[in-house]
Image (tube, rainbow, N blue to C red):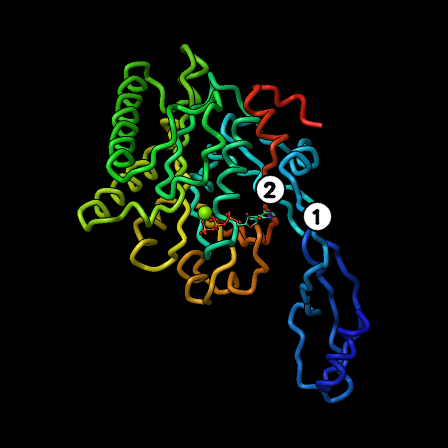
């Protein structure tokens, strides 16, 4: 804090310390400009906050995030803890929430996209039993989910090529249409109501790593986009949800259609301010410190979170279907 204050001082912007918060990866210092010395800074909200990375190499594990967040875990079959905010609170994703239907994840290589998706898979699997949730994994890079094969919640083995990915999305859209017909016959609006009144059907979450890599041809790009659009528009009521990640946050991959249909945006560290704008509609993600440091934006949120790392312990618990054993 002393260093920060004297750095401002040396710029002829005298400040007084206002306190600090220690987050999982950085410390947020707050300082208030002192105005009676002819300085040119005009404080608006009253203070300036500066986030300084901590020299802390201890990763935040999914188990720890789960434990801390247990008290505000949503009552939802499709929820998982996305990360820890600077004040230590846990932000939960709930795919039944209209402000989170569909999640778009963007970030540079090595920023933590695959780790984010892996923690989503294991978080979802710890949150609900295999009878209540089915998970489909699509991974054209063939490396992200190999050790998750065998998870009882998976609807099938990991899909790795573009043709199978397209077929998988086609089947999910058929399933969605079928569900709508069943709801209509039963005179209910959505899966929540349906499951209260009839034999419950599972929610289904499709998780795609490196979505951009599936777009090998123009016609496939159009088809994929259309599928994401349909699942984004109508999937939530049918209990079919989509989470996708891309290393290429450029306008060719993250089109307005994709953005409109995946409501919650997650930006991990990106290379440029324009990459950040493509994901979040604002700059900022270019300043993140990497390894799961992220900005999330939705209809109601803009927050900086630290995402958890999944370890063998949490994978083991999800495989055995015993979330209650989280230490
Ligand atoms: N939440 C996290 N906590 C701690 N370390 C992390 C976290 N996320 C990522 N890392 C570290 O960063 C490395 C790269 O992460 P990851 O493989 O998820 O990147 P990526 O964005 O998928 O990269 P690529 O685009 O090359 O596939 C991980 O192996 C891990 O060491
Ligand atoms: Mg990856």
- Residue name at image x 32 percent, y 19 percent: 183
Against 89, residue 283 (above or below) is below
- Residue name at image x 76 percent, y 82 percent: 9
Front-lying residue, 178 or 133: 133
Residue 261 % position (x, y): 35, 44
Disc 2 under 8 Å from ligand 1? The reply is yes
- Toward the left, the furthest residue is 219
Residue for badge 1: 58
Against 275, residue 38 (above or below) is below
User: Which mark identifies residue 281?
Assistant: none
Drawn side of residue 257 relative to residue 290, left or right: left
Q: Secondary structure at mark 2?
A: loop
Residue for badge 2: 309
Front-lying residue, 205 or 107: 107
- Residue name at image x 56 percent, y 65 percent: 287
Between marks 2 and 1, how big is the CA–CA gap?
10 Å
Drawn side of residue 261 relative to residue 121, left or right: left
Front-lying residue, 176 or 136: 136
Drawn side of residue 158 relative to residue 294, left or right: left
């Amino acid at each position: 804090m002393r260093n920060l204050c004297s750095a401002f001082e040396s710029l002829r912007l005298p400040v007084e310390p206002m306190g600090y918060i220690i987050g999982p990866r950085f410390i947020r210092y707050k300082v208030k400009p002192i105005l009676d010395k002819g300085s040119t800074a005009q404080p608006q909200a009253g203070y300036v906050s500066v986030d300084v990375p901590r020299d802390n190499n201890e990763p935040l594990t999914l188990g720890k995030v789960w434990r801390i967040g247990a008290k505000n875990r949503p009552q939802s079959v499709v929820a998982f803890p996305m990360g820890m905010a600077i004040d230590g609170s846990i932000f939960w994703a709930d795919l039944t929430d209209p402000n989170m239907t569909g999640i778009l994840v963007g970030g540079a290589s090595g920023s933590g996209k695959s780790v984010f998706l892996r923690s989503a898979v294991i978080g979802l699997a710890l949150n609900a039993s295999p009878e209540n949730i089915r998970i489909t994994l699509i991974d054209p890079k063939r490396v992200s989910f190999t050790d998750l094969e065998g998870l009882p919640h998976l609807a099938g083995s990991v899909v790795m090529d573009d043709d199978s990915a397209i077929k998988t999305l086609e089947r999910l859209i058929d399933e969605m249409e079928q569900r709508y017909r069943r709801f209509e016959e039963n005179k209910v609006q959505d899966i929540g109501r349906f499951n209260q009144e009839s034999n419950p059907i599972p929610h289904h979450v499709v998780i795609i790593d490196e979505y951009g890599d599936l777009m090998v041809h123009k016609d496939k790009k159009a088809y994929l986009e259309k599928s994401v659009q349909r699942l984004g528009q109508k999937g939530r009521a049918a209990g079919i949800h989509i989470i996708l990640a891309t290393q290429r946050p450029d306008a060719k991959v993250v089109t307005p259609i994709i953005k409109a249909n995946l409501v919650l945006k997650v930006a991990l560290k990106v290379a440029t301010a324009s990459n950040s704008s493509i994901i979040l509609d604002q700059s900022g993600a270019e300043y993140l410190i990497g390894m799961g440091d992220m900005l999330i934006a939705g209809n109601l949120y803009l927050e900086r979170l630290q995402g958890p790392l999944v370890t063998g312990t949490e994978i083991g618990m999800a495989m055995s279907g015993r979330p209650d054993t989280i230490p």
